[in-house]
Structure formats: structure tokens, C-alpha cells
Amino acid sequence: MNEKPRNPEIEGYLLQIKKIGNSLGLILPKELLARLKLKEGDKFHIVEQTERGIRLSPYDPKHAKAMDLARRSFRKYADTYKALAK
């Protein structure tokens, strides 16, 4: 795999939900933003994982389009995918 080595200092950050204007948001540490190569105004994906965990990854329009196609396919051919999974 092509994963970057983990940095326990970044993983150990405790983020707090804060009121920002009329909304709620998170303030991400600059070290984490640098690691994800994100800057103000950038978009990123949040993927919900088991046990209330999440995964953040930078927005990739090609990946977003592929995921949209996959979701539509899964909805349209749900019975076929279930049969293939057996």
C-alpha cells in the first residue's frame, strides 16, 4: 500500500465542536491541514466508519464521480449484487 506513516501527535488531537456564526464547526490544526494538503475553501470527503469513527480525505472529483456511479449501480442492481455476494 502507499500509505503515509502515521503521526501520533496529529492523531492525538482533541477537536471540539464550536459555534461559528449561526453554524457549528470544527477547527482543524494547521499540521493536520498540511498533512491532508488542505487550505481554506478546499473540500474533503468524510467517510463514516464503524463505531462512530470517520475518515477524512481530500476531495477528488474523479473519485466523487466514480462513487456516484457505483451508488447508482448498487441501487439499480441491488438484487444482482446480493446474489453475487452469496
Image (cartoon, rainbow, N blue to C red):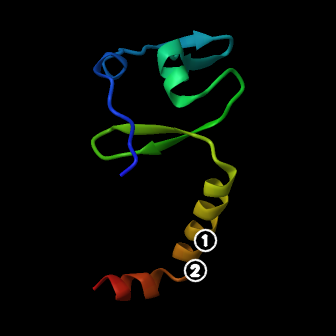
Residue contact between numbered discs 2 and 1, judged by CB atoms under 8 Å: yes
Q: Which residue is drawn at 62% across and 42% down?
A: 59
Q: Residue at horizontal 36%, vertical 46%? A: 49
Label 1 environment density (alpha carbons within 10 Å; few <14, some 14–19, many ≥20): few
| Residue at horizontal 33 percent and vertical 38 percent from the top | 52
Tag 2 secondary structure? helix
Residue 65 picture location, percent across and down: 67, 60
Q: Where is residue 76 in the image (x, y as percent from the top left)?
A: 58, 80
Q: Nearer the viewer, residue 81 or 32?
A: 32
Residue lying at the far right in this picture: please name it.
Answer: 41
Q: Which amino acid does label 2 sit on?
A: Lys
What percent of the width, then of the height, locates residue 71? Answer: 56, 67
* Label 1 residue SS: helix
Q: How crowded is mark 2: few (under 14 residues within 10 Å), some or many (20 or more)?
A: few
Is residue 16 placed above or below 65 in the rendered structure?
above
Of the numbered discs in the image, which one, if any, rests on residue 72?
Answer: 1
Dot 2 corresponds to which residue?
A: 76
Q: Give the image location of residue 56, x and y in percent.
A: 48, 36
For this view, does 24 lie left or right of residue 31? right
Which residue is at a point 42% across and 82% down the rendered structure image? 81
Of residue 80 and residue 36, the one placed in the foreground of this image is: 36
